[in-house]
Amino acid sequence: DRFHIFKNLTGDLCSYLKRTVNDRIKLIRGENSEYSEKIITRRQQNKIDTANKKWKTIKEDKRLYKEGKSKSKILKILDITRITVNNYLSLDAPPIKDSESILDNYIPLIIDNKITKEIYEEMKNQNYKGKMTILNMQMKSIRN
């Protein structure tokens, strides 16, 4: 019936917009942040927020263990698995995932509306080590 067709259509459209538009929204970090004046996407901001949340959990795990709580009590308090408790106790620093692209340093060049070949030549002059195929694959998403 029409109701269910419309409901399915709007649901699919919403999920499509969440996947595509969210990554194109740029955020400018505040000046008090370690990322001051750095423009990032919503996906990058979410990764930063997730890493910060995870680090808080790791610190809480370590604090509870130092207070003498057993690992079984810690996993119930923090709602994590036994393996995760052990992994968190072995960490001394925040786990950092390097998800930077080889193209990140060249984004100002890419944003300019130049021909791809010209951009590639300028990047090569600035010691770009990647291939032109990577640039071609990422050009549209970077410009958006």
Image (cartoon, rainbow, N blue to C red):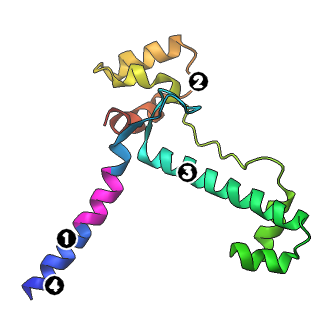
Q: Are marks 3 and 2 in contact (CB under 8 Å)?
A: no
The first of marks 2 and 4 along the sequence is 4
Q: Nearer the viewer, mark 2 or mark 4?
A: 4
Q: Is residue 144 visible?
A: yes
Q: Position of residue 115 (x, y in %)?
A: 30, 20
Q: Read off the magenta span.
A: 13-21
Q: Nearer the viewer, mark 3 or mark 1?
A: 3
Q: Nearer the viewer, residue 70 or 88?
A: 70
The residue that appears at 92% across and 70% down in the rendered structure is 68
Q: Residues within 10 Å of mark 1 (few under 14, many from 20)?
A: few
Q: Secondary structure at mark 3?
A: helix
How far apart, in angstroms, are the residues tagged by discs 2 and 4? 52 Å
The first of marks 4 and 3 along the sequence is 4
The first of marks 3 and 1 along the sequence is 1
Going by the picture, which residue comes out furthest to the bottom? 1
Q: Which residue is mark 1?
A: 10
The first of marks 2 and 1 along the sequence is 1
Left or right: 101 as drawn, with respect to 97: left
Q: Nearer the viewer, residue 113 or 53?
A: 53
The residue that appears at 46% across and 49% down in the rendered structure is 43
Question: Residue type at mark 4?
Answer: His
The residue that appears at 59% across and 31% down in the rendered structure is 34
Going by the picture, which residue comes out furthest to the top? 125
Question: Residue type at mark 2?
Answer: Lys
